[in-house]
Image (cartoon, rainbow, N blue to C red):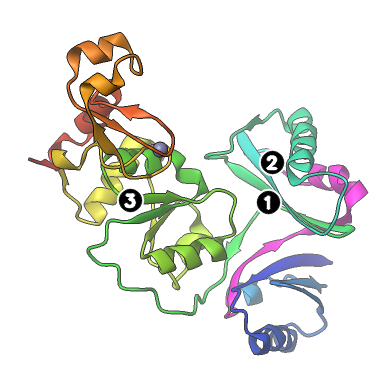
Amino acid sequence: VNHYLLRFIETGRDVQRKKQPRDLASQLPGARLEAFPGRLLVTSDGDALPILSSLHGLSSFSPCIPCAIQDLETAVLTLDLSGARSFAVKVKRFGEHPFSSLEMARRLAAVLISRWHLRVDLVTPDVVVGVEIRDQRAWVFDRVYAGVDRRGTPPDLSGTSRFYADQMLGRLAAWLRMLGYDTAYAWDIPDSELVRRANAEGRIVLTRDRPLSKNRAAHVFYVEARRVEQQVREVMIALDLRFSRSQLFQRCAVCNAPLHSVDKAAVAGRVPPSAYAIHDRFAECKRCDKIYWAGGHYRRVLAALSDLITE
Ligand SMILES: [Zn+2]
């Protein structure tokens, strides 16, 4: 018996929500279906992967192991993680529980580390062990397949240099901000919400997540490179962005707020004496009180992009 967790595009339309399970049932004879908000659990005697892979309207799906919460530690141990060197556990929880998602993720990560001798890597893990908990039930999976059809029309963002970086691209977000690009950063929000916000704010989504990169309802750019220097180059070349030095000191690398230039005298005592001695231009983030100047970090960023700079 095989189990699959199906994720729907969250249209918010009742009609769609009721129609999808019916469509699916007619294509998977004999399968048992159980609907949850935004999810459908399919139990099938045969291999349903080929049918699910061609089914329209799914955002993604995963073969999964269903279990009770108290059996989660046993369930994650049935995953074969032998090819991986690093991993992350991501827990999504619906309902009331005496533990937080983070506590559960840590507990399961400890179990997996003792079995597979893996290292935790929250940014670019080889494997993501996903856990969904709904009330007293839970599902474990380590593979996420993209659905085929992303309905919707992305906004026309040609010529835009405003971005929404996904959770895995925090360093890229900081670099883009240093270069003056207005870059929001998504931390711990569902893809559907990220897409909604990006469209509402006219931002191009930057991601290293394959299922999200196939989302046709938003303007999404899939970032291939793993090193941040190459990621910035990739984005700038693909979107035909040219950087001019006048863009420096416009955005806070930490929070994306606009920076304000500030008199040298006003930053005395707030920056290291060595920086104060050799720099004359300073800028300040009023939101996080951070002071910026063209120090070593800026030089490294600019050196990596020297051929993309126009004066
Ligand atoms: Zn700031």
Q: Nearer the viewer, mark 3 or mark 2?
A: 3
* Residue at (36% x, 55% y) in the render: 163
Left/right placement of residue 308 relative to residue 208 reads left
Q: Is residue 58 magenta?
A: yes
The answer to whether the residue bearing label 3 lies less than 8 angstroms from the nearest atom of ligand 1 is no
To which quarter of the image does residue 115 belong? top right
Point out the residue furthest to the left here: 311
Label 1's element? loop
Give the image location of residue 279, x and y in percent.
Answer: 19, 19
Query: Mark number for residue 81?
Result: 2
Q: Amino acid at mark 3?
A: Asp
Who is closer to the viewer here, 162 or 117? 162
Q: Amino acid at mark 1?
A: Asp
Who is closer to the viewer here, 214 or 94? 94
Q: CA distance from mark 1 to mark 3?
A: 34 Å
Q: Which residue is mark 1?
A: 142
* Residue at (90% x, 48% y) in the render: 71
Q: Is residue 89 magenta?
A: no
Give the image location of residue 168, x and y in percent.
Answer: 50, 45
Who is closer to the viewer here, 208 or 283? 283
For the magenta stretch, what is the residue range?
A: 54-80
Give the image location of residue 4, x and y in percent.
Answer: 74, 66
Q: Residues within 10 Å of mark 1 (few under 14, many from 20)?
A: some
Point out the residue furthest to the front here: 266
Identify whether 201 is placed above or below 156: above
Left/right placement of residue 91 relative to residue 283 reads right
Quarter containing ligand 1? top left
Q: CA distance from mark 3 to mark 2?
A: 38 Å
Mark 3 or mark 2: name the one nearer the start of the chain: 2
